[in-house]
């Protein structure tokens, strides 16, 4: 809720912006890397149950 209150106090309010391909590409790359790491986690002595 703190974030919402902060937004309401901004002088110029909020601004909607269009999609950003650089940002979305970055999120996809991070997700792909996370998936590849998860596939290997069972081989880790630290993360085994």
Image: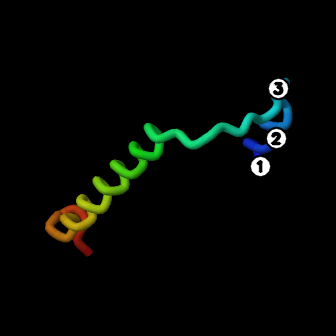
According to the picture, the residue beneath numbered tag 2 turns out to be 5
* Up/down of 46 relative to 33, above or below: below
Percent coordinates x, y for residue 43 in the rendering: 14, 67
Whole-angstrom CA distance, mark 2 to mark 3, is: 14 Å
Mark 3 lies on a secondary structure that is: loop
Q: Residue 1, labelled with which disc? A: 1
Left/right placement of residue 38 relative to residue 7 reads: left
8 is higher (above) or lower (below) than 33: above
3D distance between C-alphas at marks 1 and 2: 6 Å
22 or 44: nearer the eye? 22
Around disc 2, counting alpha carbons within 10 Å, would you say few (fewer than 14), some (14 to 19), or many (20 or more)? few
> Image point 39% across, 43% down: which residue?
26
Q: Residue furthest top?
A: 11
- Packing grade of label 3 (10 A; few <14, some 14-19, many >=20) is few
- Checking the image for residue 12, the label placed there is 3
- Depth check: give the residue in front, 14 or 6: 14
Say which quarter of the image contains residue 5: top right
Q: Secondary structure at mark 2?
A: helix
At horizontal 40% and vertical 45% (from top left) the residue drawn is 25
Q: Are marks 1 and 2 in contact (CB under 8 Å)?
A: yes
Q: Quadrant of residue 31?
A: bottom left
- Comes first in the chain, label 1 or label 3: 1
**Would you call the spot at circle 1 few (<14 residues within 10 Å), some (14-19), or many (20 or more)?**
few
The residue under the point 46% across, 46% down is 24
């Amino acid at each position: 809720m703190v974030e919402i209150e902060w937004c309401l106090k901004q002088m110029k309010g909020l601004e909607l912006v269009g999609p950003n391909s650089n940002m979305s590409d970055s999120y996809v790359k991070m997700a792909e890397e996370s998936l590849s790491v998860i596939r290997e986690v069972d081989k880790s002595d630290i993360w085994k149950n």
